[in-house]
Amino acid sequence: MPSTSAPTVPVERLGRTDLGSLVATCARALAEARRLHRPVLASWARPLELADPVAVWSRARRSTQRSFLWQSPWDDGSVLALGSARDLRGRGERRIASVRAGWQSLVRDLVTGGVTVPGLPSGAGPLAIGGFSFRPESPYEMGRLPDALMWVPALQIRSAVPAPGAEDRPVAAELRLNAVLLHDSDPEQVAGGLLHLADLCLAPETDARGPHETSVRTCDSTELPSAADWKRLVRRATDRMHAGEFEKVVLAREVRVAASAPFDVPAAVDRLRGANPGTTLFAVDHEEYTFLGATPEYLVRVADRTVHALGLAGTVPRGTTAEQDAALERELVDSTKIRHEHDVVVRMLRAALGASCADVTAETPPRVVRLANVQHLSTKVRGELARDSTAGILDFVERLHPTPALGGHPREEALRWLADHEGLDRSWYAGVVGWADAAGQGQFAVAIRSALLDGTSASLYAGCGLVADSDPEAEYAETCAKLRPMMSALGIE
């Protein structure tokens, strides 16, 4: 269970001095908006101490239809965000470029105030947070999560991730309140609304029963497609690869669950956190939907002009004994099929970073990453931005997504085959989730080991990278292993 401790600096201490500083920041933004004849983003910050960010999010998410939770082992950073000051959307093949252009335009005239907190994990100032679907067509048509949605949160808290077992100890954090001022905005009204949001989100929990529901839940599950049909699809894909149509394709399947009572999202997030150390925990609330997961894979990270990408491809199960685990690891490392699948991904990452980076390097040989239920081959790829490069995190997201680990290779041929044969709306599964700052730094995770929830319904996804000699039975077993963490977190098993 997450800590139910309140923030150690109560919201009542956001008093007259804070209100005056916030109003002054909004007034300067209003003056800029009138001078420039366009909306201007105001961002005000102050230090804060709080206990476990996940516990704060579990309470605060009830106050708004839009929230975001992020905890990453890559820099031990945490982001908690609530409400929206401005949405950044895109659609179609240019969706990421549209979001990037909107974000760059918004931060061009940024007005800041308050007191920033030094020494936080990577990134600074107001963030754009959110994600992108796997492919640009289906989410709008299916009416679930948007094709591309990033937004500037009205309330943003950044801190380090508490050490395991220390979730009830206060950590230094930065509270940031953001608003977009128009020519006719009222600075006092805007500031008052932001402080009211902070009051709602950071006030101590008054319900002694705690954040989690205790209702008994029964679930009915349906595989889409059926196991037999999915295995036939694997065989059709390998036939096309033998014919030379493409080299690799990543085929997904869905388990759709109907429950007798709504899923307890905070409880699921807490189970994911406890059972999947070393993964990135994320949860996105958008209207009636929640997209959550614990992913071992990042797409790209940019910090201090260093670009990091990760190739994670090739999977075997965990063993039930140390001897079995070691034998399966040897199988992973020695498999020609798996090494080929992995190398396809690494080659693409190196080429994508090489367009803007100098000194691109890749780990060799690949490492083995052990998770709760599976083991993966993993290769880190790193590059330093060239001196004349202005590329930022969203440029690399556009360039890399989807990698061969998510769609296939060559990209266009593999994605075309999936569109014609997979028959699923992946939504944000195998898409990306993360954040960007105004300087082009940021982190985006590959949205796997994830689920999309809507009250009493859930869609869980898993996929496998197929090459010409893939075996349908083995690939199906791999998807079952990949589904297990999320099923356990949701209490479906």
Image: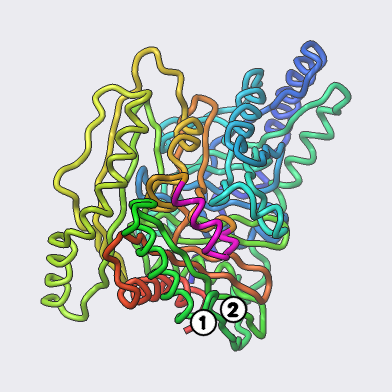
Tell us which disc is closer to us: 1 or 2: 2
Badge 1 marks a residue whose secondary structure is loop
Residue that badge 2 annotates: 257
Among the 4 quarters of the image, the one containing residue 242: bottom left
Residue at (41% x, 35% y) in the render: 122
What amino acid type is highlighted by mark number 2? Answer: Val
Among the 4 quarters of the image, the one containing residue 33: top right
Question: x, y (%) of residue 399?
Answer: 45, 34
Nearer the observer, 476 or 111: 476
Give the mark nearest the N terminus, 1 or 2. Answer: 2
Span colored in magenta = 413-426
Residue at (67% x, 68% y) in the render: 454
Identify the main secondary structure in magenta: helix
Question: x, y (%) of residue 88?
Answer: 67, 37
Residue that badge 1 annotates: 492
Question: x, y (%) of residue 469?
Answer: 26, 65
